[in-house]
Amino acid sequence: NATFPQQGQINLQNSAQLNASGVGGGRIVIRGGRLTVDNSKIQANTTGSTGGQGIDIAVVNDLDLANGGQINSLSTKGLGAGGNIKVNAGFIRLDGGGQVDDNFTPTTQISAATGDPFLGGGPAKGGDIVVQTGHLELVNSAQISSATFGAGKAGRIEITASSVRLDARLTTPT
């Protein structure tokens, strides 16, 4: 069991992707001092009938998502359950910059879903989202969302924070 006394800063920017998607989706584990996801994506999607393995992020200081930065765990066909997303950071800020995509969906988000908004989906459950932080901020149309577009149930969202600032929305459409 290794210990790292100095945990560094991790930056994903300029459309970078950390992607472990596929049948069963791989597991993504990130540990660091600070994580910035700026106009980039971290995603572990399952594309088949095997359940996704999800995303586990723990940073000592700040987690910042901005300019379309995303953390996603999806079951794209709704056949295998979506993987869970677990995020633990001292301070979490999602800043959407007021941006939306062509479907008027906020682009800066932490999202777990099952199925496809246009094609529907199968019976699989979406992944859960668990957020633990000292302070959580969602501003300028950023969102944390759990959704289903098929027969499966959306996953749950659990937030544990000393303080929360919402100048946007927190949604769980079903």
Image (tube, rainbow, N blue to C red):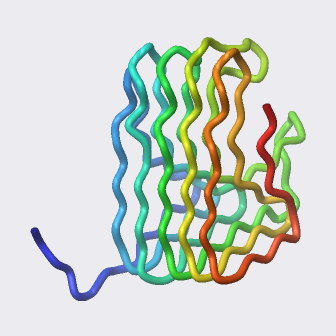
Q: Which quadrant does the N terminus fall into?
A: bottom left
Residue 52: give x, y in percent of width and height. 42, 31
Residue 139: give x, y in percent of width and height. 81, 69
Q: Vertically, is 32 above or below 18?
A: below
Extreme-left residue of the structure? 1
User: In which image quadrant can residue 39 be found?
Assistant: bottom right
Q: How many labels does the image show?
A: 0
User: In which image quadrant can residue 151 be found?
Assistant: top right
Give the residue drawn at x 75%, y 50%. Answer: 107
Residue 21: give x, y in percent of width and height. 43, 32
151 with respect to 168 (left or right)? left
Residue 86: give x, y in percent of width and height. 48, 56
Give the residue drawn at x 34%, y 55%. Answer: 29
Q: Which quadrant does the C terminus fall into?
A: top right
Please name whichever residue, 63 or 160, is drawn nearer the observer in this view of the structure. 160
Q: Vertically, is 149 above or below 62?
A: above
Q: Vertically, is 35 above or below 141?
A: below
Give the residue drawn at x 61%, y 57%. Answer: 158
132 with respect to 7 (left or right)? right
Please name whichever residue, 155 or 113, is drawn nearer the observer in this view of the structure. 155
Give the residue drawn at x 81%, y 37%. Answer: 173
